[in-house]
Image (spheres, rainbow, N blue to C red):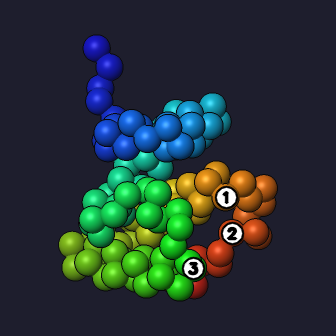
């Protein structure tokens, strides 16, 4: 029996499902991790992946800071910062058709 993926309900959205499957072609473990990170981020802010996709860089950066501030209180910030930024960046590149990392909004400065 297969274990249920964390935040599997996000896969009901066709765009999220295509993104997940694209990531899974490279690495199933990374795809599962990214899905969980995207789900945690969205859940913590009460938003959907589609909402994340339409945010401007400044708004997204502010949400990252808030997310990591609360994660830091739970002593998880150092563990989750890098993978969460990578997961959200991957999602944004997929949705907007960005071909390279340099085309994505600079999210590195929130670390």
Q: Residues within 10 Å of mark 2 (few under 14, many from 20)?
A: some
Report the front residue among 92 and 86: 92
List x then y, in percent, for residue 84: 46, 62
Camera-nearest residue between 52 and 103? 52
**Total of numbered circles in the picture?**
3
Q: Position of residue 45 (x, y in %)?
A: 30, 69
- 99 left or right of 5? right
Residue 50, image x and y in percent?
46, 57
Q: Is residue 43 something one can see in this rendering? A: yes
Vertical comparison of 98 with 25: above or below: below
Residue that carries the numbered disc 1 in the rendered image: 96
- Relative horizontal placement of residue 102, taking residue 44 as reference (left or right): right
In 3D space, how far apart are the residues under numbered discs 1 and 2 (Cα atoms)? 9 Å
Quadrant location of residue 47? bottom left
Image quadrant of residue 38? bottom left
Q: Given contact means CB atoms under 8 Å apart, are the residues at marks 1 and 2 in contact?
A: yes
Q: Is residue 82 above or below residue 69?
A: above
- At label 1, counting other C-alpha atoms closer than 10 Å, the crowd grade (few under 14, some 14-19, many 20 or more) is few
Identify the residue at horizontal 59%, vertical 60% (top origin).
92
Mark 1 against mark 2, which lies toward the viewer? 1
> Which mark identifies residue 104?
2
Q: Relative to 87, is 40 on the left or the right?
A: left
Q: For marks 1 and 3, give the CA distance.
A: 13 Å
- Tell me the tag on residue 29: none
For marks 1 and 2, the one nearer the N-term is 1
């Amino acid at each position: 029996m297969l274990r249920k993926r964390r935040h599997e309900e996000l896969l009901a959205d066709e765009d999220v499902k295509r993104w997940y499957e694209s990531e899974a072609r490279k690495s199933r473990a990374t795809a599962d991790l990214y899905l969980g990170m995207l789900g945690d981020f969205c859940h913590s802010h009460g938003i959907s992946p589609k909402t994340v996709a339409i945010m401007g860089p400044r708004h997204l950066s502010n949400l990252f800071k808030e997310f990591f501030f609360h994660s830091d209180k739970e002593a998880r910030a150092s563990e989750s910062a890098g993978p969460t930024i990578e997961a959200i960046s991957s999602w944004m590149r997929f949705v907007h058709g960005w071909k390279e990392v340099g085309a994505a909004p600079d999210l590195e400065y929130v670390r």
